[in-house]
Amino acid sequence: MHVASKVHLICVTVAFSAYVTFRVFPTHGALGHAIDVAHLVEVSDIVLVGQATSVNDEGLLTIETPSGSIPGKRLLAAVSPDEFLKGSVEPPPLLLVEFLVPEAPFAMRGIPVGQYGIFFLQKGTSRYRISDPLYPFLPVVRNGRISSGPPLDRVIAKLGETLIFERSTEVEITSALDALATIQRDSATQTLRHALETTSGELQLRIARQLVAHNDITGLDLVEKALTHSAGSSENVFLNLAGSLGGLKDPKAIPALKRLLETHDQHIIKGAAIALRQSRSADALEPLSLLLNNSDEQVRYYSVVGLGEITGQDEWTPAFNEFREHEAKYLSYWRSWATPNLPRNTQNSRDR
């Protein structure tokens, strides 16, 4: 690669021979982990928006991973920064960013020539490297709004733009949505809520699912409608929607959860049972008591434990192994308890 001498370069390479060994230490200590954007921002010295203007092969190496050695190669991407979201380098340089690519398909991602995105870099003794080989960059809208505030909030704003940008690809949308879903921060929730209001169709439903999975009932109405009118939905979409109910803890979700129990679908019922238990609300006692007769062992367990936790009866709130060994005892107790204490309880509802 030829670069004019007047251009300031930050070199992030290390010396290498024709064949060297490189040990990979991802941010969470193991390959194959899910992205954690807050952690990624925290451990990065530089977070920037820019474009990889060129990529050069720097030779073969052996990549040592927790799963063993794999052959690969070292590459250098020249990244031209447009905006620094965390840290900065003065004067603005052309950054040479090292990354590794296994010869066989693997979890680590490469950086294509021309890739525009948010790049996460760490500084070593005298160099920079990709902060996490699995997630070297995240999608961003070119010529987007200049962000401000703490670094994580700035990343969130960029991901939100990608999510609602009309020309974002499916890969970019999925990447941005998955990344936002990992962030437990009000600004991330507000970004998802804004996207819920400004999108439609399948994308809107995916956003609603993420909100529900993170205990935000803003998306619950859409999720409920999709689950109760699921004809035509793929099995994967249906299961993801049903599973998202298990993220709910807000007692305000109880009316919708009670309606969803009427579907008699075991996937929905299991998610609803988890949410009812987590609500810690007396309003959840009646629907939980109706699940004591459910055909699924886990649903019966959530019912028993939810009743015990909400009423404060610790002696009748077993661990799962204890419940499995003495299930009849616990079911008998809570059925007997429900009859006088929950007058609206309908013990004939045996299929929920």
Image: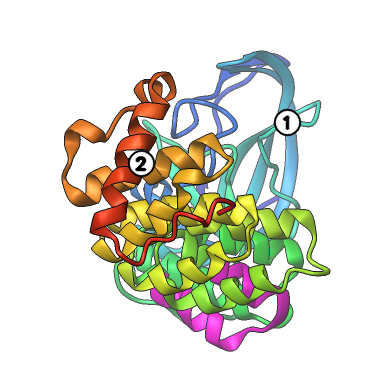
Instruction: Look at 30% across and 52% down and name the residue there.
Output: 338
Residue 92 in the image: x percent, y percent?
46, 63
Q: Position of 84 compared to 141: left or right?
A: left
Q: Residue 10 versus residue 309: which sits nearer the camera?
A: 309
Image quadrant where one finds the C terminus: bottom right
Q: Residue at x 66, y 67 (%)?
A: 173
Q: Position of residue 180 (x, y in %)?
A: 49, 62
Q: Quadrant of residue 269?
A: bottom right
- Residue 94 in picture, x, y percent from top left: 56, 56
| Residue 203 found in image quarter | bottom right
Answer few, some or many: residues within 10 Å of disc 1's Cα (few below 14, many 20 plus, some between 14 and 19): few
**Which is more toward the observer, 308 or 182?**
308
Q: Identify the magenta region.
A: 189-209
Specify the label residue 106 is tagged with: 1
Q: Is residue 47 left or right of residue 279?
A: right
Is residue 94 visible to the viewer in this orientation of the structure?
A: no
